[in-house]
Image (spheres, rainbow, N blue to C red):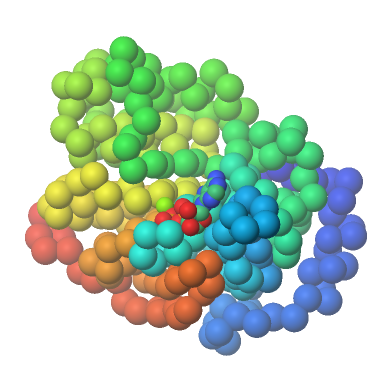
Amino acid sequence: MPSTAGLLAARTPVIKRRLAMAPLTSQTPAATARPPVFYVRSLTKVYGMGAAEVHALAGVDLDLYAGELAVLLGPSGSGKTTLLNNLGGLDVPTAGELRYHDFDLTGAQEAELTRYRRDAVGFVFQFYNLIPSLTALENVALITEIARDPMPPEEALQMVNLGARLDHFPAQLSGGEQQRVAIARSLVNNPSFILADEPTGNLDTRTSEEIMRLFRSLQDRGITIVVVTHERDIAEWCGRTIMLRDGKLVGEDRHPQKVFAHESSNRA
Ligand code: ADP
Ligand code: MG
C-alpha cells in the first residue's frame, strides 16, 4: 500500500524495533507465524468525564490478520462500534497501543488519519448512507474524486453484481441492493481492508445472507474484512468470531465458515 507506506516512512525504524520486541500473544501457533495487520494492546476508550465517564473500551488485546473475514460479536453497548471506529481512524483511543502495520494510530496527526481513512479503509454502515439524489454509479464515483488509487466505479459495482443497476437512484433499489452500492463505494478506493458496522442490521435474513456471501467472495479476492454484529447467525458465516462485552474481549472462536444453502447455484 504505497500511500500509507509513504506517510509512515519517517517513523518506520522506531516502530519496527518496537514490533520486534513486542510479545506475541496470539492464540494459535499458525497465527503467530505472520505479523498481524492490526496490533491492538490494552486499548482503552473513555467517553465523558467524572461521574459521566463511560469506559467504552476497557483494555482490548487483539491481532487481526491479512485476508481474514472476522466478526466482532457483542450486545448493544459492548463497544463494537467504538473498536471499529478506532481501527478505522474515525476515533482515537484514550490509552493503549493500536497499530496498522507500522502506522501508530494512537499518535497520528489528524492529516495522517485523514489520509489513512481515504487510502487504506473502506467503511460500510448499517443504513448505507447513500446520497438519495445521486445514482448508484454517481454515489460510487463521488469517492473516486478524492481517492488516490481508485478503480473505475463501474468495476466496483460489477464486483457487487450491480452492473445492471448503474443508473438507478437509491429509492429505486431494494435494501440489499442499496447496501451493495455502499459496499461498492467502500471498494472503489482499493482499500486494504473493509470495516462494516452492522451491515445486515437493516436487512431480512435472506438478504443478510446475500451480503455475507458477497463479503466471502471479497475475502476470496484477498480483501481483509471486519464485520460488527450483535447477531450470532451472522457470525457463523465468518471464520473467526471475537466476542465483546462491556468493552472487553470475552472470548474468541475460530471455526469453519458455514456453507450457504444453494452455494453452487449462486452468483456472488
Ligand atoms: P456497540 O456498538 O457495541 O453498541 P458502542 O461502541 O457504540 O457500542 O458504545 C459503547 C459504550 O460507549 C456505550 O455505553 C455507549 O453509550 C458509549 N458511547 C459510545 N460513543 C459515545 C460517545 N461519543 N460519547 C459518549 N458515550 C459514548
Ligand atoms: Mg454499534
Q: Nearer the viewer, residue 125 or 136?
A: 125
Q: Nearer the viewer, residue 203 or 225?
A: 203
Can you say which quadrant of the picture contains the N terminus?
A: top right
User: Left of 251 or right of it: where is 46?
Assistant: right
Quarter-of-image position of residue 40: bottom right
Quarter-of-image position of residue 31: bottom right
Q: Is residue 257 above or below residue 263?
A: below
How many discs appear? 0
Picture coordinates of residue 168 (x, y %)?
A: 22, 18
Could you tell me which residue is drawn at 49 percent across and 60 percent down?
79
Q: Is residue 99 visible?
A: no
Q: Is residue 136 above or below residue 14?
A: above
Picture coordinates of residue 95 (x, y %)?
A: 73, 61
Residue lying at the far top of the rendered structure: 133
Quarter-of-image position of residue 183: top left
Could you tell me which residue is drawn at 45 percent across and 64 percent down?
78
